[in-house]
Amino acid sequence: MNPTPPASVRPATVDLDEHGRMLVPGTTTPVPDARVADHLARHLRIPEWATDLFVYAHGWQTSPAAADRAAAALIDRATGLHHAAPSAYPGLATGFRPWCVVVRWPSSSLPSLHGYRRIRERAHAMSTRGQAGRILGHLLGYLDSGRGRPDAPRVLANRHGQYLHLLGHSFGGRLLCEAVQYAADRPAGPPVLSWSSRPGDPSRPFTVDSALVFQMAAPRDAFTRLFPRLFLGPGRASAPLRGPLVLTHSRWDRATGFWHLRAEGLPGIGHSGTGSAPVPQFSTRLRPVGSPYPHAALDHPIVNVDAGHVYRGGLATRLHPSGAHSDFQHPESAHLLLSLAAHSR
């Protein structure tokens, strides 16, 4: 039996610099390449009481403290929902005890077109020319290091029965996709993101049970033009992302609407959802708490979730330069997160 978690659990953290290098906690000193694995093992001790491990990457204009608060609020809200109505999530009958690692990176800039482009380029460079892909690969591999082959092939859990999930917001989702695709091109082998109903690829080192990105800051054709190697396709017998990749969008999101349109010539996924993609998509609406997500609504390579009726904010939010871009801290978001965790079993 897993030990009981403490009453309050602060997220663990991994700090990256603008080159994607992992930093020694509380400093601006990069961890030497040869010491990354040892550093993770020393500073990120996975608690045995946890049932679900989350890796959260924040978005534009987010300080380290704000990133910690955002991740903690989302996880706490999900935990509260499960405690209030455990029978609403039958896949979590054995419990939901989350533990979260927050990936923090320098995302601040002026709230301007130049600032938006600057952070977009930084997120891209951190993964493609920097080291974020390798660091995130190390992180996911470390978190999954205890995972063994279970008797039931549909269940992807490690020896403690723990499930691994990705969470992102804004450029954080783009950073995760950039990093995973970059890691997929490395000779050492990529991480694998896989839904429990699809068999994993034994040639790859690990799997992730769900991926959820709130208001992704990427063009609508990103999965065709920027991230085509995330999915299975012609000439590819395997891929690092098998799905589902769940993406919310809201027409009240000005950051991925107004700013993204001017920076990249197209509205972003966070405003309008995914456009073209190399794999089948499914569209649904963000459901209220108490309205279950059927497995069939989430078991697709890409799931676009229209959250415009919830992610809209008040008048002050709509007048803000980013609009409702960060207005995802709602019970409905926690309900979606819990539903993905439940269907991963």
Image (cartoon, rainbow, N blue to C red):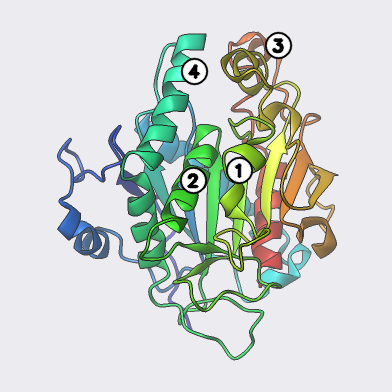
Q: Amino acid at mark 4?
A: Tyr
Q: How much space separates mark 1 and mark 2, taking CA atoms?
A: 9 Å
Which circle marks residue 342 in the picture?
none
Of the image marks 2 and 4, the number of the one nearer the N terminus: 4
Which circle marks residue 116 in the picture?
4
Q: Residue at x 39, y 40 (%)?
A: 128
Of the image marks 1 and 3, the number of the one nearer the N terminus: 1
Q: Amino acid at mark 1?
A: Val
Q: How much space separates mark 1 and mark 4, taking CA atoms?
A: 19 Å
Q: Amino acid at mark 3?
A: Leu
Q: Tell me the quadrant of the picture where the C terminus can be found.
A: bottom right
Q: Position of residue 190 (x, y in %)?
A: 45, 62
Of the image marks 1 and 2, the number of the one nearer the N terminus: 2
Q: How much space separates mark 2 and mark 4, taking CA atoms?
A: 18 Å
Q: Residue at x 58, y 11 (%)?
A: 321
Badge 4 marks a residue whose secondary structure is: helix
Residue with the mark numbered 2: 176
Image side of residue 172 versus residue 313, left or right:
left
Q: Residues within 10 Å of mark 1 (few under 14, many from 20)?
A: many
Q: How much space separates mark 3 and mark 2, taking CA atoms?
A: 32 Å
Residue with the mark numbered 1: 213
Badge 3 marks a residue whose secondary structure is: helix
Q: Residue at x 47, y 40 (%)?
A: 175
Residue with the mark numbered 3: 315
Residues at circles 1 and 4 in contact by the CB criterion of under 8 Å? no
Residues at circles 1 and 2 in contact by the CB criterion of under 8 Å? yes
